[in-house]
Amino acid sequence: MMERKKIEDYETGQAPSPKQVDRFGFMKLENSHSPEALNRSKSAFEFEREERRVRKWRKMIGVGGSDWKHYARRKPHVVKRRVRKGIPDCLRGLVWQLISGSRDLLLMNPGVYEQLVIYETSAAELDIIRDISRTFPSHVFFQQRHGPGQRSLYNVLKAYSVYDRDIGYVQGMGFIAGLLLLYMSEEDAFWLLVALLKGAVHAPMEGLYLAGLPLVQQYLYQFDHLVSEYLPKLGEHFSQEMINPSMYASQWFITVFSYSFPFHLALRIWDIFLYEGVKIIFKVGLALLKCCHDDLVKLPFEKLIHALRNFPEEVMDPDTLLTTAYSIKISKRLEGLRLEYVKINGKEAESSESSGKQKQLLRRHAHHLKFEPEERNGEVIQSC
């Protein structure tokens, strides 16, 4: 049994009764438009349709994901369509591991996670402990002091801070790890975090958390230009009111919408993000602004900032918002803006460069970890 690091001196919360939490494990809000309320009105036909969808997915991925690679190679268009419709919640954890490449990393590196948690120390341990209670505080899994959720979150973040000491720990990572832990084990969550930041499938994203947040700066540059080009009237209004994306969109990229957006929407975005890459964050961001365009162009600075951090509930419907997002074609322009940013800044943003080389190094990295003494100061909830 893996030993647990002792976690002390962070805030506690009263564990809610089962009747107080929604189907995802969050404290319920009195809101007739919540997903929970909508689920109560689902017809028998809709439930049967959901069961058929689960059966299709099970057939597609095979037992334990054994058929996934073969199916994905043969019918990528079918996979993309089904991912965009939403991965069944009871299969989400497994599918996320398959489409992110993290399952392969786990299988190639047995025992590495345990080594990182038990035998290594991290300069970030106190920072992690301080932030744990701030991660999904309204979720039952993370509310109990010294409970399984907080301990697992600590272990994953501590392990990554040792695995990649250049990054260490940054607060936004807690929401990424926390979201993953709701759908998979500690070790699975750790390797998915590695897959994302080191680029097992898509371009590496570690620059989101490196000193100076270089990749965040690049993304904000790209997004600012996309707003001006795709929503010129709103872009001009932002310019007049001196609004820039760093005032409202940084956490979209740093936490992939997991920080303050409705959980059912965040999950759908994550399905697509893990399969298609970071461009969905740009698309969803533009879709949000497009849906609220007519209201936003009328607002002065202070009200505009508030609106950009508190989008109306009717805009947050996943099917409606994502349909709008899919209609926005930005792939070529994104790449053009990336090259433009590199030219202006004289170098590639960290973790965007040579992703092919990064992927090769990643598959060998854990095997060559040197477990040196620290020299610096400084159960799964699912529904099926």
Image (cartoon, rainbow, N blue to C red):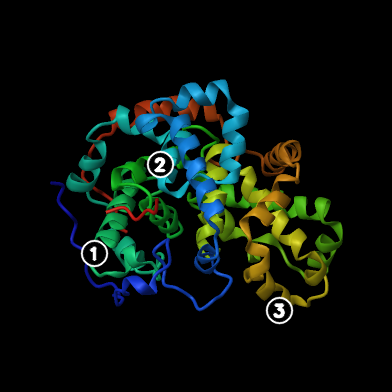
Disc 3 marks which amino acid? Answer: Glu
Residue 176 vertical placement versus 335 (above, below):
below
Q: How far apart are marks 1 and 3 (CA)?
A: 40 Å
Q: Which residue is drawn at 33% across and 61% down?
A: 128
Disc 2 marks which amino acid? Answer: Leu
Q: In which quarter of the image is residue 339?
A: top right
- Mark nearer the N terminus (2 vs 1): 1
Local secondary structure at mark 1: loop
Which disc number belongs to residue 302? 3
Q: Where is residue 82 in the image (x, y as percent from the top left)?
A: 58, 38
Q: Residue at x 54, y 60 (%)?
A: 42
Question: Looking at the image, can residue 316 be seen?
Answer: yes
> For this rendering, which residue is in front, 347 or 106?
106
- Mark nearer the N terminus (1 vs 3): 1
Q: Which residue is drawn at 67% across and 49% down?
A: 282
> For this rendering, which residue is in front, 296 or 366?
296
Which disc number belongs to residue 192? 2
> For this rendering, which residue is in front, 80 or 13?
80
Q: Where is residue 238 in the image (x, y as percent from the top left)?
A: 78, 66
Q: How far apart are marks 2 and 1 (CA)?
A: 22 Å
Tag 3 near tag 2, CB within 8 Å: no
Which disc number belongs to residue 147? 1
Q: Position of residue 236 (x, y in %)?
A: 85, 63
Q: Where is residue 14 in the image (x, y as percent from the top left)?
A: 29, 77
